Image: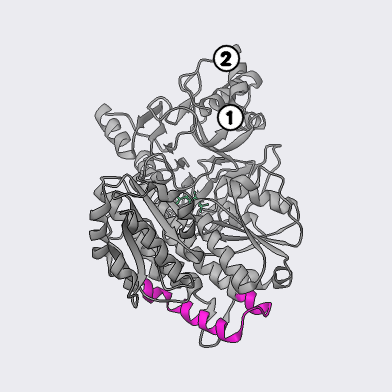
Amino acid sequence: MCGIVAYLGKKQAYPLIVDGLRKLEYRGYDSSGVAVLDENLSVFKKKGKVNDLVNFVNKENGDTSGTIAMGHTRWATHGEPNDKNAHPHLSGNGEIALIHNGIIENYATLKNALIDLGHEFKSDTDTEVLVHLIEEIQKKGNLSIEDAVRKSLEKVVGAYAIVVIDKKSPDILIGARNSSPLVFGLGDDEFFLGSDASPIIKYTNKVIYLEDEDVITINRNGDYKIVNLQNKTSTHQIKELDLKIEELEKGGFDHFMLKEIYQQPATIEQSMRGRINAAEGWAILGGMSKHMNRISKSKRIILMACGTSWHSALIGEYLFEEIARIPTEVEYASEFRYRNPIITEDDFVIALSQSGETADTLAAIELAKEKGAFVYGIVNVVGSSIARLTDAGSYIHAGPEIGVASTKAFTSQVSILSLMALYLGHERGKISGGDYRELLTALEVIPQKVEEILDQNDHIKSIATEIKNASNALYLGRGYNFPVALEGALKLKEISYIHAEGYPAAEMKHGPIALIDMYMPVVVIATNQSAYEKIVSNIQEVKARKGIVIAIINEDDTIIREMADFFVEIPTTAEPLSPLLSVIPLQLLSYHIALMRGCNVDQPRNLAKSVTVE
Ligand code: M6R
């Protein structure tokens, strides 16, 4: 949700900023802009992708020289995506430039007060209000730019990560955050600020994750100072990043999404490394073991997440109730925080997030903690806000996920949830020794089975050809595979813009069946599970209404392959683990359909990878 990068050092800053923006583009891509300070403060902004900005700068023959600069790639909140609303925004006197990720909630009040003082605004954004406020406060109090920024932020309600450059202070870069991420990178005689580490890692692996209400002032001479809004100095540990630059590249694949789908045998294995040993008969998670006393006595589990992570959470509900026998509820983080939920100290709350920065999930965690619950994080991005806010947790270790449509994070989250349920079920004595060993063994061989499904890519592509022109699609599944139906539908709609709905297969007859006709593809997850016969009946009901059935079946299936228009065979596994396999063909199907429809699979319209606003 908007990407920020800034540089202060000895090199020419513009090429570094453009390179950084390309890495951050997955966070927002409706417009972008840069500000470079040399003798002049030059600002270039353009609607569209980073390439459009670069072409514009080249065409204008813009002056991009300077060793201090910042760039922004936008996901619009206030004001439509166009040139004037793109960041950076300038103060009225043109001397202060600002980039921002977040929302200034009280912008309207501030804007009216500034208009009364004679300020004129050029954009429709909340961000421009903040840069005018800084200018006003600086002028009125005759303040340094650092103090003006800090005092302005005291008046702001909302979420922000900002970077400010002031023409009058050419050796200073200022950054600040509240609820939106900002990372400070410390290189040799050069310094960076970024929404995440991706634009920084090429130059240094030493970083500081800024905390809420931190304001950092970085000086060209190498000094830096971090204070809070009350001007009290805060100290932060420098961390070493364990991230390789190749992880941020497509690695020979046409798209990040395809690379990430194909990484799944490795990422699922990585999520389990050192956490399971079927031969010795154990599953353990370090994050849980230290708190097992408290966790195993929990009266209830509450899983909270958004989007695809919420679908993983739904699978978690089935796993925890079946294997650990603890009543489990699943909450949309965005809904949970705006009611008055009943949470007690006996609750074990688990928050799931790939990015670790989702604003709604963060707020829900804060609420759960306030009410005394123990909060556990299942997070991908190391050092992210959710990883730091939770009481304990497990990283899924999937590596950077750059395609906006989440794929490998989903399977790694489900793998961690399976391990947690097994560990907890075993500790609580709720799973028999035989079932425990059987599930451990089945879990360990999941990566090889995913590999077998990926080998069917061409076949899945041929099915995509048959249904690519559909306007609607229905996804059906039962039990553990109902959340997979939801996930399959989400994947299709977000990257191909085909309207798709996921439904519990048995619910179809209570309404959605009215939609079925000869043009409606119905994707049915029909693996050999407890409700197999019921799924067969559901398929009959679709066929009777001339729907096009695409079935995901097991290799030994003999019935559904005869009924379906198209089918994909997947290896058999234990039912609780079946989502780890059944989701793979659905990811590939969406990928191919989107590509055939000419859609941008890695950067679908209107979306951004990490949703850091409410
Ligand atoms: O980073 P998070 O897991 O917290 O993100 C949650 C959702 O925004 C995310 O899963 C979103 O739904 C994806 N676009 C799904 O592919």
- State whether residue 463 is above or below residue 421: above
Residue that mark 1 sits on:
145
Q: Secondary structure at mark 1?
A: helix
Residue type pointed to by label 1? Ile
Residue type pointed to by label 2? Ile
Whether ligand 1 has any atom under 8 Å from the Cβ at mark 1 is answered as: no
Which one is nearer the viewer's eye here, 143 or 123?
123
Classify 10 Å Cα crowding around label 2: few (below 14), some (14-19), many (20 and above): few
Q: Position of residue 610 (x, y in %)?
A: 48, 47
Residue 575 among magenta residues: no
Residue that mark 2 sits on:
115
Which residue is at a point 46% across and 40% down the rendered structure image? Answer: 2
Q: Secondary structure at mark 2?
A: helix
Whether ligand 1 has any atom under 8 Å from the Cβ at mark 2 is answered as: no
Which one is nearer the viewer's eye here, 130 or 492?
492
- Answer left or right for 70 relative to 209: left
Q: Earlier in the sequence, mark 1 or mark 2?
A: 2
Residue 297 figure quarter: bottom right
Q: Quadrant of the C terminus?
A: top right
Q: Position of residue 468 (x, y in %)?
A: 27, 50
Which residue is at a point 63% across and 52% down the rendered structure image? Answer: 236
Residue 153 figure quarter: top right
Classify 10 Å Cα crowding around label 1: few (below 14), some (14-19), many (20 and above): many
- Answer left or right for 322 relative to 348: left
Bounds of the magenta segment: 423-450
Is residue 212 shown to the viewer in this render?
yes
Marks 1, 2: nearer the viewer? 2
Is residue 400 shown to the viewer in this render?
no
